[in-house]
Amino acid sequence: MIGYYLNLALRSLKRNKVLTALMVLAIAVGIGASMTTLTVLHVLSGDPLPGKSGELYYPQIDPQDARGMMPGTMPPEQVTLIDGTNLLRARQADRQALMAGGAVPIQPDASALDPFYVEARYTTADFFAMFDVPFLYGHGWTGIDDEAHVRDVVIARELNEKLFKGADSVGRTLRIGGTMFRIAGVLDSWRPNPHFYDLTTGSYNYYEQAFLPLQTALELRFAKNGSNDCWGNGTGGVVGGAYPSATCVWLQFWVELDSPARAAAYRQFLVRYSEEQKALGRFQRAPNVQLRNLMQWLDHNGVVPSDVRLQAWLAFGFLLVCLVNTVGLMLAKFLRRSGELGVRRALGASRRALLAQLLIESAVVGTAGGIGGLLLAFFGLWLVRHRSSDYAALVHLDAAMLLVTFALAISASLLAGLLPAWRASKVAPALQLKSN
Amino acid sequence: MKLHPILAALRKHKAGTVLIALQIALTLAIVCNAVFIIGQRIERVNRPTGLDESNLFLISQQWVGAPSADTPDGVEKLDAMQREDLAALRQLPDVVSVAPINSIPLLNSSWTGSVSLKPGAQLGGKGNTRTAYYFTDEQALSTLGLRLVAGRAFTAGDVQHQGFRDQRERPIAIITRQLADKLFPQGSAVGKVMYTDGSSAPTTVVGVVERLQIPASGSWGNEFVWNSTLIPTRLDANFARYAVRTKPGRLDAAMRAVAPVLYKVNPLRVLDDDSVKPFDEIRAKAYRADRGMAVLMGVVCLILLCVTAAGIVGLTSFWVGQRHRQIGVRRALGARKADILHYFQIENLLIAGAGVVIGVLLAVGLNLWLMTHYEMSRIPLPYVLTGVLAMLAMGQAAVFVPARRASNVPPVEATRAA
């Protein structure tokens, strides 16, 4: 039966090519626009560490002075060096890492290469294990190395290509900012998007080339990037004035906690720590702590640009108009065929059979629209990629979105066909025959 | 022509009528808001920075192995390096003037703070205005092309220098007219005293420039976008930025000459592809997202109007086909072609009118929703009215072809079986 209906549908669609083309085009444009924006939204709001993100938490505490305090305000988005170091040494989580972004001058031995700056991350040892960072050669350093201010560096694959033509460079030396470092490891391609562990350097398409132990970088006074927020009249910095003062937050601190119970316990620890610091006179405010996991942290920071959300809403409004349009056109098409449908009714076809026939016809339109929409979505994404925003290069259509496209197209056209098909299937057989 | 028969006929085509009206309403709502967004973005992109933007470029460079800016000795060395660079750049044949500067409008790298009329005022307190600082020297006004409206420019004797993170008193400053009007609503700002960043040391305003945008192009800077303060100080760090004004038409030549000259002064530095940038490029980069959004909205509006117009053509054609015989009867009874044409035109006007009324409500509702979720202001009435007229015009244009086909139905059609 379905084969026969399909045949009928194709015949009927062929009979009025302009109307058919209009319907297919309307669905295709609507689907194409919404899939393009939805894909961008999907890519940008994706999980940078699937499977792991639920166990990673970003603790926040409030070390600010009492001036300008208002109830309900959020604690600062980063930590001071002293609090970060305290929390790190407390070792209350399964893993913990304290870090800051920076830029370091690389001075290659090969005279063919001029010195150049690369983006760097100064971090403690657990960073690599915590964020499941893949290594091509070697491995990271250890917590003991951190304390020993060891001159170790982990470089990204790209930098290894540039300096050593991709060879296994573990154990070789590299001059960074006038100091010799030993290469401990080379990362495989690792491009977390968004750049979740430090959003102050830009959310998308920001990758460090060199990873150095935090204490080593501080000792050598390497330049830091990213933002710092200060309060009070903090003048003069820490580490001999090279870094922001003790009343500035400028480092990120991450912990790994494998269960919600551990997370609750860690929150308690943060409260205890704040109370302790208040008793010592360092903190002035009542404990104000936050412990968000990775996705909550991204959400809190609103990393997805609001323009992208706006575009997605707009595209769905657009799809709605296209659907209403298709409903209208289908209604016209089906009602015009009242005569033919009346004859089928008179010959014994049930109302349900007519409904099935008409719905199959709309499904055919939907499938054609879906294919057209998919092509338009590919075109739209190509346009997005060529708009050279910082996230442009990331935008690709994956298998899941492909399925969503077709599901959306067919369900949309079935929905659009429902009312017209129902109206048309209600024809009274006798009346139609008589009027003809 | 009487409306009654039209209304009676429409009652027979409830579903189609409602669909067209709904489609017009939704289209109006979306198009109004989209055009409003386009208008806002265009306005943002087109606002002048206050600079003379042609023949201007920016150098951002870093030294390798530079002395630390945290010791007085290091600061002096860095300042000497910077002065050497400036002297070399100023010697270039195509260069008119050069100023060291920490940032430039639309660069999105800013040093912001607050200015107040009282000493020691807290940030965010009363009588306290946010501002963005430009640390520069006596060639700033000529290099940036700023228009001085009161007071005087900086002289070489005014210029201090300091380490990047040091705090130093700021005895004098030049501010923008906008900031001057805010701080000193009565009378001229020149010679008056203000306090920066909660300091207790006074800063005397020596000059006022017509207009100078802050470096931040994002919406977070909207509330103080014209509140710039120029401080005659060279900042010394392991990096430096220089704004360069070239002779007319010599921009490319001057930009090409920069790298060799600076490497000659001191080869231990990083100058890459991004280091030398014409101002046009900085502007284009700052507004890339806004421009993209405006284009996208424009395309969406255009397609939406086409889709809606096509829908009207489709449904009206169907009605014309359906009423072939009735039209023939009317023609046989003496109706002129124009009467038939007007019939369909008025019918469309009625439907579109109903759609437009709903559409205006939807447009305002959508605007209110967008205002709560995104940065949007209230949609001005002219946008809505233009949208209404556009929708009605589009309806009439779309209905014209099928209506004319209807008016061409010969009277003899009445005698044929439908």
Image (spheres, rainbow, N blue to C red):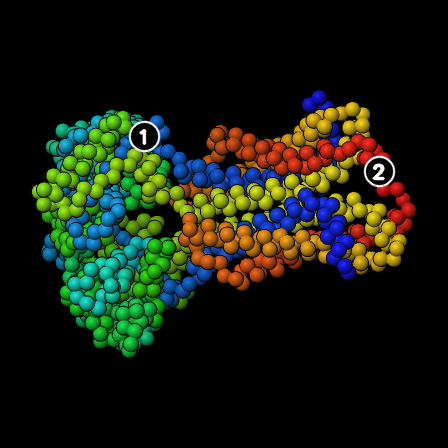
For the C terminus of chain B, the quadrant is top right
Residue matched to label 2 = A435
Residue lying furthest left: A280
Q: On screen, B292 above or below B184?
A: above
Quarter of the image that includes the N terminus of chain B:
bottom right
Q: Amino acid at mark 2?
A: Ser
Q: Position of residue A76 (x, y in %)?
A: 23, 45
Q: Is residue A121 visible?
A: no
- Badge 1: chain ID: A
Mark 1 and mark 2: Cα distance apart in space:
68 Å
Q: Quadrant of residue A419?
A: top right
Write down the residue under mark 1. A54
Q: Residue at x 72, y 41 (%)?
A: A332
Mark 1 or mark 2, whichever is nearer to me: 2
Percent position (x, y) of residue B179?
A: 30, 68
Q: Is residue A64 visible?
A: yes
